[in-house]
Image: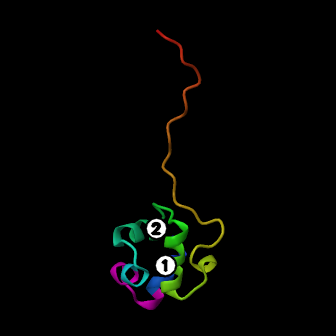
Amino acid sequence: MRNAVARLAAARGWSDAQLAARAGVDRAHLNQVKNGRALPTVATALAIAHALGVPVAIAFPPGASARRRPTRPAATSCRRS
């Protein structure tokens, strides 16, 4: 499921390049944010929300986060062989 930024941009008919230009952010980073692969900084989130003309809480609702890649379990001991 696409996030709010993706839905809001699509509703306006904007491409990633158009939204990135309006927000003054890098298109590749915007794409990562839209696809849930990265979290924006506060400044970037504000810039994107401003470009979309919505409060930051609408563009980035509470509970929204980037998808985390599974990580390997942490070592539980440090024994030497």
Picture residue at 48% right of the left edge, 64% below the top: 36
Q: With 23 as the anchor, is 4 left or right in this view? A: right
The answer to whether marks 1 and 2 mark residues whose Cβ atoms lie closer than 8 Å is yes
Residue 55 location in percent, x, y? 61, 83
Residue 21 location in percent, x, y? 36, 82
Picture residue at 54% right of the left edge, 76% below the top: 46
Establish if 41 lies above or below 78. below
Is 74 one of the magenta-colored residues? no
The amino acid marked with disc number 2 is Val
Picture residue at 47% right of the left edge, 77% below the top: 6
**Residue assigned mark 1:** 48
Give the residues in magenta. Answer: 11-19
Establish if 55 lies above or below 64. below
Give residue 7's mark.
none
Viewer-side label of 1, 2? 1
The residue carrying pointer 2 sits among few (fewer than 14), some (14 to 19) or many (20 or more) residues within 10 Å by Cα, namely many
Establish if 40 lies above or below 8. above
Is 16 one of the magenta-colored residues? yes
Give residue 33's mark.
2
SS under mark 2:
helix
